[in-house]
Structures are given as structure tokens and as C-alpha cells.
Amino acid sequence: MNCQKAQVLMSAAVDCELTVKEEEGFLLHLSECKECKDEFEDAKKTKMIIKEKIVQFKAPQSLFNSIMELTSASSVER
Ligand SMILES: [Zn+2]
């Protein structure tokens, strides 16, 4: 796996939506690539912070959706 592929899988990985095989390759890449590992850690933190804020302020679903779109800009289409 290269960085480009890892970037594509990044947001699905944060959501734990990778297949076993994808996750294997993704985690292997992270073990070899500090840049992607750091980005993955950041993405996970960002997602947690967003989740906390949503719970805290009970944001409307439309706002939640636009935040999720912003944070998964590098995502594959679902
Ligand atoms: Zn990488």
C-alpha cells in the first residue's frame, strides 16, 4: 500500500469501516509511514472531538452532516 491508498482508506478506517484485508494493509502502512500514522491519529482525535461536541450541544443533523463532509474530504464515495 502507498500513501495515496492509505489516504483514501483513512476516513473509513476512522469509522472502523474497513474490511479485514483493507485494515491489515492500512495498519501495515501506518507501521511503516509516520506521516500517515500521524494523520490517522489526528483524524481519530478530530472525530472524537466532533462527537463530543455533537453530544454536548445537540447540533442539528444537517450541521453534523456538513462537519462530516468537511472531515472526510479525502474519503471514497460510499
Ligand atoms: Zn503513508
Image (cartoon, rainbow, N blue to C red):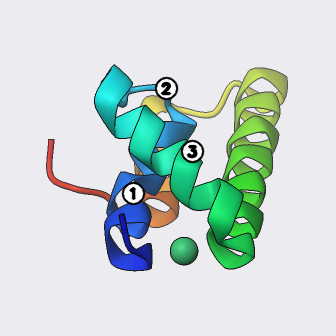
Q: Residue at x 74, y 73 (%)?
A: 34
Point out the frontmost of discs 2 and 1: 2
> Cβ of disc 1 within 8 Å of ligand 1?
no
Which quadrant of the figure has residue 59? top right
- Residue denoted by label 2: 16
Which percent across, then down, holds residue 39? Answer: 68, 67
Label ID, residue 27: 3
Which percent across, then down, holds residue 21? Answer: 31, 30
Type of amino acid at the residue the image marks with label 3: Leu
Asked if residue 65 lies left or right of residue 38, the reply is: left
Point out the frontmost of discs 3 and 2: 3
Give the distance between the C-alpha atoms of the residues marked 1 and 3, in whole angstroms.
Answer: 24 Å
Mark 3 or mark 2, earlier in chain: 2
Q: Residue at x 44, y 76 (%)?
A: 3
Mark 2 or mark 1, earlier in chain: 2
Task: Look at the picture and state if 24 lies above or below 63.
Answer: above
Task: Look at the picture and state if 44 lies above or below 74.
Answer: above
Q: Is residue 23 or residue 43 the one in the foreground?
A: 23
Label ID, residue 69: 1
Give the distance between the C-alpha atoms of the residues marked 3 and 2, in whole angstroms.
Answer: 12 Å
Label 2: how many residues lie within 10 Å, few (<14), some (14-19) or many (20+)? few
Q: Which quadrant, please, contains the C terminus?
A: top left
Label 3 sits on a secondary structure element that is helix
